[in-house]
Amino acid sequence: MADYSRILQNLEFINISTDTFTIFEWKPPKSYKSYILDLNVVKQNPISNIFFHLFKGNMKIVHIRLKNLIYTAGSNNDVQFQLLEALIEQVSVVFNEIYDIESYIKYDNFSTAMFSSFKDEIDNIINNFNALNSVMDLKVPCMVCNTILPVIVKRSFIDNAESYPVPLVYNHKGHAILCFIDKNYDIRGVELVNVTG
Ligand SMILES: [Zn+2]
């Protein structure tokens, strides 16, 4: 198993926002960068329950809108999107366990200072990420690179799939492969796919 806690040392920020303002932000120690512009892009997106991926400069940004909150994580390019998604899923679960945030928002009865100690929870999630067992790293052959690639997948993505095998595109080094993963996390096929957009 890969050391996900070490990979997550590449995180740049985690942000939890309402439609109007940030209620919580985590950054690694000694990071003074600001991500206000990135978050404005995220807030313009009204779609719920779907992960969105962005590239911004050298950063990868993943965001999702769940009920009244928008969860965003940014990292450098060393972190795969599925790992960032799994991280956000765990952050949202723990945040909602600790805070009754939907009622706070409904009654407009909270101050962002209430959430400052959640930084410790983020550190816990990162440090104990392997124990969560929320992702798998699969070995996928790429016929272009002629190598075996480590591809990270969320367990929730595979376990909650409606049918198998599940298709997953891995976009790397200017080309993309489509891999098919069965419910036992075995690779059932790999194809080179064309990409546009
Ligand atoms: Zn390749």
Image (cartoon, rainbow, N blue to C red):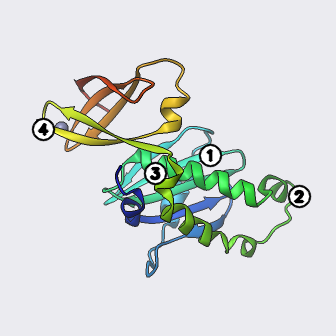
Q: Tell me the quadrant of the picture where the C terminus can be found.
A: top left
Chain-order first, disc 4 or disc 1: 1
Instruction: Give the number of the mark in front: 2 or 3.
Output: 3
Residue type indicated by callout 4: Cys
Which residue is found at the position 39% from the left and 30% from the top? Answer: 185
- Judge whether 174 appears above or below 168 on screen: below
Chain-order first, disc 3 or disc 1: 1
Residue 8 percent location from the top left of the image: 41, 61
For mark 1, what is the residue? 65
Residue 64 percent location from the top left of the image: 57, 46
* Whole-number angstrom distance, CA of label 4 to CA of label 1: 36 Å
Instruction: Give the number of the mark in front: 4 or 1.
Output: 4
Question: For this view, does 184 lie left or right of residue 116?
Answer: left
Looking at mark 4, is its residue's CB closer than 8 Å to ligand 1?
yes
Which residue is found at the position 44% from the left and 54% from the top? Answer: 61
For mark 3, what is the residue? 84
For mark 2, what is the residue? 107
The kind of secondary structure element at disc 1 is: strand
Q: Are marks 4 and 1 in contact (CB under 8 Å)?
A: no
Residue 137 percent location from the top left of the image: 35, 43
